[in-house]
Amino acid sequence: GDIVEFYGAHQAGIATPSPNFILFAAFDVVGTSLDSVRALFKAWTAAAASMTRGEPVGEESGNDHLPPTDTGESAGLSPSRTTITFGVGPSFFDHRFGLAGKKPAALVDFPAFGGDELRPEWTGGDIGVQVCSDDMQVAFHAIRNLSRIGRGKVVLRWTQEGFQRTGAADPKGATPRNLLGFKDGTANPDTDDDSVMNRVVWAQSADGAGWMAGGTYMAVRRIRMRVEVWDRSTLADQEQTFGRHRASGAPLGGKDEFDEVNLEAKDASGKPLIPMNSHVRLARGDGSAQILRRSYSYSSGMDNKTGQLDAGLLFICFNRDSRKQFIPMQQKLGQSDLLNEYIVHNGSAHFACFPGVRQGGYIGDTLF
Ligand code: HEM
C-alpha cells in the first residue's frame, strides 16, 4: 500500500524504502522551556501519525471565523508512502533545557573536514525533520503544518528539497542515479537483515545513551556538485573517480552492478583497476566501518554569483555511532577523494534520531 506506518520499534524513513522526494527541515527551539518542547513533540506526533495516513491534522472547528486547522493542500491526495523522521542535534543538549547530562557521547559536533565550505544557511539545527514522500505537495504540506503547529516554539533554520527518479519513470525501481550520472546506493547494507541493521544502524542500549536504543544517528551534508567541471571530464576520468563503470554501475574490473568489488584487481602493468584515491576504495576502506546511505539529489535553481546550477547531493546517512563510522569515513574522503575536484560540502548537520514511537507514546518520550 502507500501507507508507511508511523508507529513502530524504529522510526520510518530510515530502513524503509526511499520514496521519490524529500523535504528536509532543520528547526531551532525558541525559549528555554522543556515543557513547551514536550508539548510540541506530543502535538507533532499526533500530526505526523495523521499525515502519514493521508489524513488532515486535527479536527476542523466548523467555525468559519477561524483559520482552518489543516492548511488543505493535501486534501484528497493519497498518503504517498510519506514518512516523517525526527531527530535532535548537539545544540539541543546545551544549557537551555537541562538535558546536557543526557546528551549521547556519539552526538558530537562534526569536526571540520577537508574541503568543507559550510554555509550557516544550510548548517546545524536543534531539531531535524526529514519528510520523504512520493508526492512533493504532500511533503510540503507536512513540513508546513509541522512548522505551523510549532509557531512560537520553534523557528525554521534551513530546508532543502530533493528528488530521485520517480516510480513512474522507473517502475522496476533500479538503483537511482545521482546527478553525476552514476548509480548511487549499490553497496548499501541490507536493510532487511536485522543483525546487519543492529550492527551498522540502530543504537544499542549498551552504547551509552539508553534512551537512544533503537534510534540512530543521521549525518546530513548538502554537497554541491560542480557539474559544469564534471561535464568536461572524460568518461575514463569519471569512472576512475568512482572506481565503477558509469553505464552498468559495475566495479572497475567487473561486469555487472552487483559484482564483487575487487580492490586487489590490477591491469597488465600492475596498476590497481580501482584507483587508490577513488571514491569507492576510500569509502570502503577495510570494510569495518559501514553506513546506511539514503541520499537525494537536489536542484536549487541557479547560483546568481556564477550563473551555474546549484545542484548536487543531499547526502544523508544513518549509523550507530558517527564517531566510528561516518566521521572517519568523511575524514578520509575529505583528504584525498578524487571526487573532491567536482564537489564542495556547503551544508552539514548531525542529529540523534529517536527510537520508534509506540502507540500512545510521542517522539522523544524515552529522553524526557
Ligand atoms: C559509494 C557517489 C558522497 C560514502 C558511492 C558510489 C557512488 C557514490 C556513485 C558507488 C555506488 C554505490 O555503492 O552506491 C557519491 C557522490 C557523493 C558521495 C556523488 C557526493 C556528492 C559520499 C559521502 C560518503 C560516501 C559524503 C560518506 C562519508 C560512500 C560509501 C560507498 C559509496 C560508504 C560504498 C563504498 C563501497 O563499499 O563500495 N558513492 N558519494 N559518499 N559512497 Fe559515496
Image (spheres, helix red, strand yellow):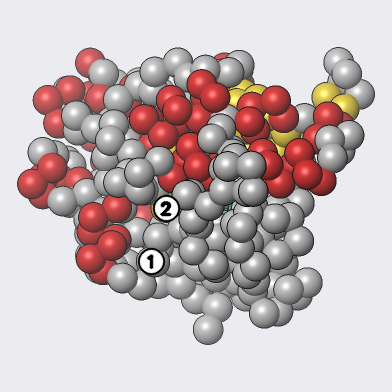
Q: Quadrant of the C terminus?
A: top left
Horizontal side of residue 61 vs 6, given as left or right: right
Along the viewing direction, whichever of 328 and 91 lies nearer the viewer: 328
Q: At which x and y percent is residue 98?
A: 17, 23
Horizontal side of residue 293 vs 291, given as left or right: right
The residue that appears at 55% across and 60% down in the rendered structure is: 186
Mark 2 or mark 1: whose residue is earlier in sequence: 1
Task: Tell which residue pokes out farthest to the front in this image.
Answer: 269
| Marker disc for residue 191 | 1
Kindly indicate whether the residue at mark 1 contacts the one at mark 2 (C-beta within 8 angstroms). Answer: yes
Q: Residues within 10 Å of mark 2 (few under 14, many from 20)?
A: many
Residue position marked by numbered label 2 in the rendering: 292
Residue 294 in sight in this render: no
Q: At which x and y percent is residue 182?
A: 70, 53
Measure the C-alpha gap from mark 2 to mark 1.
Answer: 8 Å
The residue that appears at 40% across and 60% down in the rendered structure is: 189
Along the viewing direction, whichever of 107 and 333 lies nearer the viewer: 333
The residue that appears at 26% across and 68% down in the rendered structure is: 194
Rendered image quadrant of residue 10: bottom left
Rendered image quadrant of residue 269: top right
* Residue type at the position of mark 2: Leu
